[in-house]
Image (tube, rainbow, N blue to C red):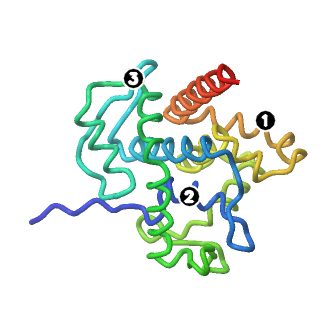
Amino acid sequence: MAEPTERVPMVGLVEEITLLLLRDEGGSFVRVPTVSLRYSTAGAVLMELADANRIDTDLQHLFLVDATPTGDALVDPTLAEIAAAERQSTRYWIERTAERADDIRKRALASLVARGILTEQDERFLWVFKTRRYSATEGQVRQEAKLRLMAVLLSDDIPDPRDVMLICLADACGIFRALLSGRELAELTPRIEQVTRLDLIGQSVMRAIDDVRTAVAAATAGHL
């Protein structure tokens, strides 16, 4: 008897980061710095691989746990690169994956359209389902990312591990500054900090993104 194939979540972290940035009306995306968007995409790829038990991290390195492809075309190319390379830091893989982030994001949008979650009209992407829900692993129905994360931030409940990862990504890349008003951000910052401390791989990715961002800022300042 053939072994069952691994189920791939209908909406992965890469796609959810993309959906987080989609405005509720009008079909446009919230504007965030290009570098933040690329790093958040790269971080989502690595977190997805960690959640699938393909990689792990320690204080110095990101290392391979299992080279078996996940079946997710958005993350498997990075998994193959990690499997073929010498052990490197998380920062290295953030930078490496960010080089392909624009293409990964385009593929994520195409996947969302192909599965009927978004529809493309005149170069705009519009929600198809008014309920803002979509199918996920094992037939569950998950609320759209933005609504789900706000529910986490406005409660004291222990969040789902994938929601923790998504909050880590949104925080590390400044997405909350685009999604929330200044007052909302000030009120929710303690909860955001509390949630981001719950995920070790998320903390590792956040530190790597901060390191890269600091290095980029320093290099940019040096050329002014």
Residue 119 at x, y = what percent?
56, 79
**Quarter of image, res 29:** bottom right
Labelled disc at residue 129: none
Given this view, does label 1 or label 2 mark the residue nearer the observer? 2
List the single residue furthest toward the front. 224
Query: Would you place residue 18 above or below residue 176 in this image?
Result: below
Residue type of the residue flagged with mark 2: Glu
Describe residue 8's horizontal placement relative to residue 83 as left or right: right
Describe residue 21's horizontal placement relative to residue 118 as left or right: right
Which of marks 2 and 1 precedes in the sequence?
2
User: Closer to the camera, 94 or 65?
Assistant: 94
Residue count near mark 1 (Cα–Cα under 10 Å), binned few <14, some 14–19, many ≥20? few
Q: What element carries label 2?
A: helix
Q: Are marks 1 and 3 in contact (CB under 8 Å)?
A: no
Mark 2 highlights which residue? 16
Mark 1 highlights which residue? 190
Describe residue 221's horizontal placement relative to residue 96 as left or right: right
Describe residue 137's horizontal placement relative to residue 154 as left or right: left
Mark 3 highlights which residue? 61
Residue 216 at x, y = what percent?
60, 28
Query: What distance separates the C-alpha of mark 2 from that of mark 3?
Result: 26 Å
Q: What element carries label 1?
A: helix
Residue type of the residue flagged with mark 3: His
**Quarter of image, res 26:** bottom right
List the single residue furthest toward the left. 1
Residue ID at (79%, 38%): 189
Which of marks 3 and 1 precedes in the sequence?
3
Residue 87 at x, y = what percent?
30, 25
Given this view, does label 1 or label 3 mark the residue nearer the observer? 3
Residue count near mark 2 (Cα–Cα under 10 Å), binned few <14, some 14–19, many ≥20? some
Query: Would you place residue 149 above or below residue 91 in this image?
Result: below
